[in-house]
Image (tube, grey):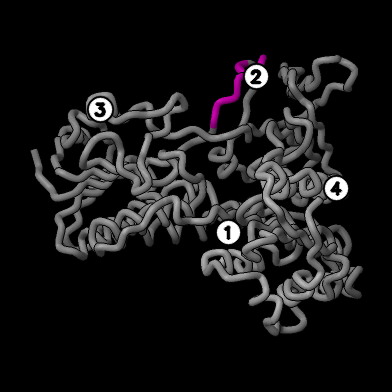
Amino acid sequence: MKSFDAIVIGTGQAGPYLTSRLAGAGLKVAVIERQLFGGTCVNTGCIPTKAMVASAYAAHMARRAADFGVKVPDGISVDMRRVKSRKDEISGASRTGVESWLRGMANCTVFQGHARFESAHEVRVGDEVLRAERVFINVGGRSLMAQIAGLETIPYLNNSSMMGVDYLPGHLIVVGGSYIGLEFGQMFRRFGSRVTILEMSPRLIPREDEDVSQAVREIVEAEGIDVRTNSKCIEFAREGDAIRARAECDGNTPEVTGTHVLLAAGRRPNTDDLGLEHAGVAMDTRGYIQVDDELRTSVPGIWALGDCNGKGAFTHTAYNDGEIVAANLLDGDTRRVSDRIMAYNLYIDPPLGRVGMSETEVRKSGRRALIATRPMSKVGRAVEKGESQGFMKVLVDAETKQFLGASILGVGGDEVIHCILDMMYAKAPYTVMQRAMHIHPTVSELLPTMLGELRPLE
């Protein structure tokens, strides 16, 4: 048995940061990684997919070159092998960087293999047993296996196996019209595939406001993507080399015949094979580790960070988990999960930036609120760039004048949203931003203008 001051299981976004803080404080730390360093973000999530989104955007703009007065040779084509190799280069450099950082870190010992608890403070890795009074679980999540009739009869892809695709699917059927499905759907449509998206709910990205869902649908349909909502009776079957999908229960909607299927219908935590029962760590019915506001589990001395705790399924929430734990343990700075304001982006083009409450949530709360909206067609920067799809929406508390939330669907929306986010953290009244002089020409410059047009939410 080897003894350490702390064990960190998993090298996603929370793990390496927390390890560096613990090791920097002089603690002897063991880090366990069973497969690829860097977790989902580095290997199958943010970094590789956004590299592919960039390639898809380049193809899209090349086809639109004439709109900008630019002549290009006829027959724009996409080299999928080069798309993949570029993605691999970017992702690989990040993965290698994480591994090198950890292996070269003072007071840190790296173990490779599958970790499994033998008790609350003992973790087995291969033939070795590691012991520590403090254990930090950062094991992430994976694609959820959808319960679909006929799925066992066909080959299919998920967000991880899509990273190995170096060819152009003839017709990609995407199961799931939310964040992952929409990103991959638009991406491969721009590469040149036919794309059909099957969504069980009445609309795309059902957690968003209805006007946002409708605008996103219009954006992707304008690019030739076939969107089929209310697909509650999905069933697959082989048809020679093709795959046939039935989507609706009434049988009146034509079946879809495609070449490839992507399952993008949710995620699940990687907690089922950790031996958590031997440690006594409590989980909910979906397998997420239950934690308190400072990310402590039901067992003293064990914390859970990142996607496996159900407190946020994003790189930034995972990293923030690491900051919260480090602050409480090492800095004497009380930080809590409940202190943070939920914010995220949907990386279709144009992107959707989201922060705080949606309009639907504000209405349900019953509070007096103000709202302002502006179409991107009335944002000079968007018009100049030839990317005027989408709109901006801001919600404010009528009494405190503080921001409640915002949806920015449009060019630069993934960056502009931080203007609202920072004001919310500052708990500043909207009048501070309204009176600010923003730079022209930008998308952000219209935020003060919008705030001068606030009206009661009725």
Alpha carbon distance from label 1 to label 3: 44 Å
Question: Which quadrant of the structure image shows residue 364?
Answer: top right
Alpha carbon distance from label 1 to label 2: 34 Å
Question: Which quadrant of the structure image shows residue 254?
Answer: top right
Name the residue beneath numbered marker 1: 86
Q: Main secondary structure of the magenta part?
A: loop
Let me know if residue 324 is in the magenta part: no
Alpha carbon distance from label 4 to label 3: 49 Å
Alpha carbon distance from label 2 to label 3: 33 Å
Give neighbour class at mark 1: few <14, some 14-19, many 20+ (Cα, 10 Å): some
**Identity, as a three-letter code, of the amino acid under mark 2:** Ile
Of the residues tagged 2 and 4, which is closer to the observer?
4
Name the residue beneath numbered marker 2: 148
Name the residue beneath numbered marker 4: 218
Marks 1/2 in contact by CB < 8 Å: the verdict is no
Name the residue beneath numbered marker 3: 280
Q: Residue at x 34, y 27 (%)?
A: 273
**Identity, as a three-letter code, of the amino acid under mark 4:** Glu
Marks 1/4 in contact by CB < 8 Å: the verdict is no
Q: Does the rendering let one see residue 55?
A: no
